[in-house]
Image: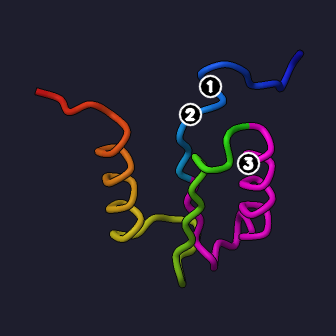
Amino acid sequence: GQGTISGVNKEIPVLQCHGDCDPLVPLMFGSLTVEKLKSMINPANVTFRTYSGMMHSSCIEEMMDVKQFIDKHLPPVD
C-alpha cells in the first residue's frame, strides 16, 4: 500500500541533520521525523545528527558529516 517501504529500500541508509536552534523547523519535528523513519526502514541505518547553535542553515561540521556519509555509502567516482 501507499507509504509502505519494502525490499531493498528497507535497508537504505539515511542521514538526517538538524540545527538545534532552527526557528523555521523546530528540532522536535526533526526528532519526530527520525522516529517515523526508524519505524519504516531498518532503524540501524538511520543516523540523526544535531548541530549546536545552528539555525535553518548549514555548518562546516554538518558538511563534513554529509561528505563522510556519501564517501561511506556511494562508490568512488573516477
Q: Secondary structure at mark 1?
A: helix
Task: Give the left or right position of residue 11, taking residue 36 as reference.
Answer: left
Q: CA distance from mark 1 to mark 2?
A: 5 Å
Q: Secondary structure at mark 2?
A: loop
Q: Secondary structure at mark 3?
A: helix
User: Residue tagged by mark 1?
Assistant: 9
Percent from the top left, x then y, of residue 53?
A: 54, 84
Task: Give the left or right position of residue 33, taking residue 60 as reference.
Answer: right
Percent from the top left, x then y, of residue 3?
A: 83, 26
Q: CA distance from mark 1 to mark 3?
A: 13 Å
Q: Residue at x 66, y 19 (%)?
A: 7
CB atoms at circles 1 and 2 under 8 Å apart?
yes
User: Residue tagged by mark 3?
Assistant: 38
Percent from the top left, x then y, of residue 63?
A: 36, 60
The 10 Å Cα crowd at callout 3, few under 14, some 14 to 19, many 20 or more, is: some
Quick check: 37 above or below 66? above
Q: Residue at x 37, y 39 (%)?
A: 73
Q: CA distance from mark 3 to mark 2?
A: 11 Å
- Name the image quarter holding residue 31: bottom right
The 10 Å Cα crowd at callout 2, few under 14, some 14 to 19, many 20 or more, is: few
Q: Which residues are magenta?
A: 16-40
Q: Which mark is residue 12?
A: 2
Taking the magenta stretch, the answer to whether it contains residue 22 is yes
CB atoms at circles 3 and 2 under 8 Å apart?
no
Q: Residue at x 37, y 71 (%)?
A: 61
The 10 Å Cα crowd at callout 1, few under 14, some 14 to 19, many 20 or more, is: few
The residue type indicated by label 1 comes to Asn
Task: Give the left or right position of residue 71, taking residue 19 as reference.
Answer: left
CB atoms at circles 1 and 3 under 8 Å apart?
no
Sequence order check: which comes first, mark 3 or mark 2? 2
The residue type indicated by label 3 comes to Lys
